[in-house]
Image (spheres, rainbow, N blue to C red):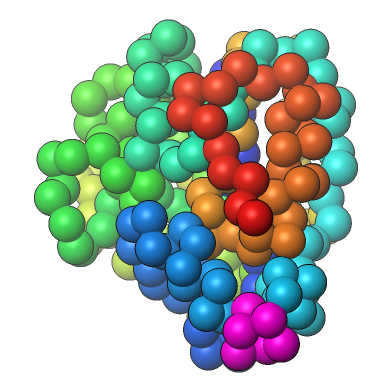
Amino acid sequence: MLLSIDWDAFSGTRELVFDAPIWGTRDREEDRLDAWTARARRRGGTWAALDADFPLYPGWEALRAYAGVPAFVTLSHADAWTWLETHPGLDVLNVDSHHDLGSRSGDPARVRPGNWAGLGLARGLIGHVTTLYPDWHADLPVAEGHDLDRTRGEIRDLLPPALLDRVTLTRQARPGAGLPDPARVTSLLLVQSPAWTNPAHDAAFLALATDLRAAPIVPPLARP
């Protein structure tokens, strides 16, 4: 199996943060830095001021257990097909704050962060995909992973029945839960997703990539 880790499963948000990108954002250059700079200015001017509303949730430390598994790191899930094409047809576990099975905006045929998994299913690059939402979604009523039945209903409009049969949505019971035995993982992809993740957590992300000896597909950002 393949293991995909989106950093936004750990670099997240508190409930009722009006400008949190988890509720919907694009993945443009300005979303990766300028939008976070504006959020920081509203809170006092430094990246550290973001942590009250955008914490680094526990559980990511468990990923160090995958040291020795062939690993890759990249900027965005839009780059995921470079990784998928090296092991086509395997099942994927995607630890993520979003299912990435499709969206109602943008070009549906172009691989983007919001549709890479759905297109991978449709084009035979993924056998079965499981989205493992982080445990902290249980406390955010509007998050995808809070009400799984609601989210399953939403994806019925995005994928045909034959593909829905190859999709599982689930949520961690606690931080670090639900991760596979490293011996079962053929390869791991670590995705920074800077449009959605707090720049104050870049150092932890980059250190994790180093611990995993992750080879870069597209180099991640170290935002100043």
| Front residue of this view, candidates 13 and 87 | 13
Name the residue: 22% across, 25% down.
123
Is residue 151 among the parts visible in the rendering?
no
Toward which corner of the image does residue 200 lie, by quadrant? bottom right
Name the residue: 68% across, 81% down.
45
How many numbered callouts? Answer: 0
| Front residue of this view, candidates 217 and 96 | 217
Is residue 36 among the parts visible in the rendering?
yes
The image position of residue 11, as x and y in percent, is 68, 59
| Front residue of this view, candidates 87 and 170 | 87
Residue 216, relative to residue 139: is it above or below?
above
| Front residue of this view, candidates 204 and 124 | 204
Q: Is residue 192 left or right of residue 91?
A: right
Identify the magenta region: 40-45
Residue 21, relative to residue 89: is it above or below?
below
The image position of residue 152, as x and y in percent, is 40, 61
Queried whether the magenta region covers residue 109, the answer comes back as no
Looking at the rendered image, the quarter that the C terminus falls into is: bottom right
Queried whether the magenta region covers residue 41, the answer comes back as yes
Name the residue: 18% across, 40% down.
110
Residue 74, relative to residue 182: is it above or below?
below
Looking at the rendered image, the quarter that the N terminus falls into is: top right
The image position of residue 160, as x and y in percent, is 19, 46
The image position of residue 193, as x and y in percent, is 51, 49
Toward which corner of the image does residue 73 lie, by quadrant? top right
Name the residue: 66% across, 12% down.
70
Q: Is residue 211 left or right of residue 100?
A: right
Residue 137, relative to residue 176: is it above or below?
below
